[in-house]
Amino acid sequence: MEELRIVGSSRILAIANQKGGVGKTTTAINLATALAAVGKSVLIVDIDPQGNASTGLGVDRFNREKNVYDVIMGHIPMADAVCESVIPNLDLVPSTPDLTGAELELIEMDRRSHRLVEALAPIKGNYDYILFDCPPSLNLLTLNALVAVQSVIVPLQCEFFALEGLSLLIKTIERVRTTLNPSLEIQGVVLTMFDKRNKLSDQVAQDVREYLGDKVYQTVIPRNVRVSEAPSHGKPALIYDHRCAGSQAYIKLASEVIRREKRQFAA
């Protein structure tokens, strides 16, 4: 992969889509693993109450006493919630089911949309990349992530209704950019669960590329049994089976992410 040095600054990205089952968490943990594999220091902040990114990185549900809920509520600094994953160079702030009720608690708080950006500030210089794995909804947790990040990566499943949900997410990102985070942008859209045997996948990919142009990554993530199996073993697919088609696709995606960052910083 191409080398990118960002002196004194982290690149902070959200992996977001309000639809569930689109490969969001799979993209987050495997993209992070690929970045870590080429020497980048990476932090994943798991803000999905389901905690799948935490599980997929080998952090047991009973070993999350310090977690992102405590950070958002202001009980502990984010540095105290950081734990090592099973991957060298890749740390994690784990999730907890307590996040399910966090939105109701946040409503009563001052600067409720800025809890994550303020918590992140003391440690963001410690990592080359910080990735937020967002919940499958456009709620206050996702809003907090969109305020905290510079860019959004959108996993988009190759299915019939793909573009419907995407338009709503784009409108949300535009509103956040206008009111809360003027630097926010879509870094790219990654097509997931692509089935080359299915004409619908080709049609969806064509439609999305016509709609969004070069915002869509060239890399397409295929449907792959080994990628689906990996979370049950507490490992990213790149560790579980780095030779499988899905793992190789995520390695290529990481290369594209780095190239886009390099072009942005050269501009």
Image (cartoon, rainbow, N blue to C red):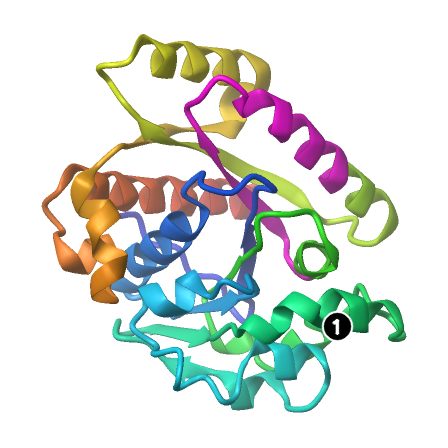
Residue 209: give x, y in percent of width and height.
49, 17
The quarter of the image holding the C terminus is: top right
Instruction: Please tell me which residue is depicted at 63% across the width and 23% down the height of the picture.
Output: 164
- Residue 157, relative to residue 138: is it above or below? above
Residue identified by numbered label 1: 115
The three-letter amino acid code for the residue at tag 1 is Arg
Foreground of the two, 263 or 144: 144
* Nearest the eye: 23 or 30: 23
Residue 153 is one of the magenta-drawn residues: yes
Q: Can the viewer see residue 117?
A: no
97 or 173: which is nearer to us? Answer: 97
Residue 263 horizontal side relative to residue 88, left or right = right
Q: Where is 241 relative to 189, above or below?
A: below
Q: Residue 42: which quarter of the image?
A: bottom left
Q: Is residue 66 magenta?
A: no
Residue 205 located left or right of residue 130: left
SS type, badge 1 = helix
Q: Give left or right: position of 175 versus 102.
A: right
Residue at image position (45%, 47%) is 24
Residue at horizontal 39%, vertical 55%?
A: 4
Q: Circle 1: is it few (<14), some (14-19), or many (20+) Cα within 10 Å?
A: many
Q: Start and end of the magenta stretch?
A: 148-173
Q: Quadrant of residue 37?
A: bottom left
Which residue is located at x 27 percent, y 58 percent?
231
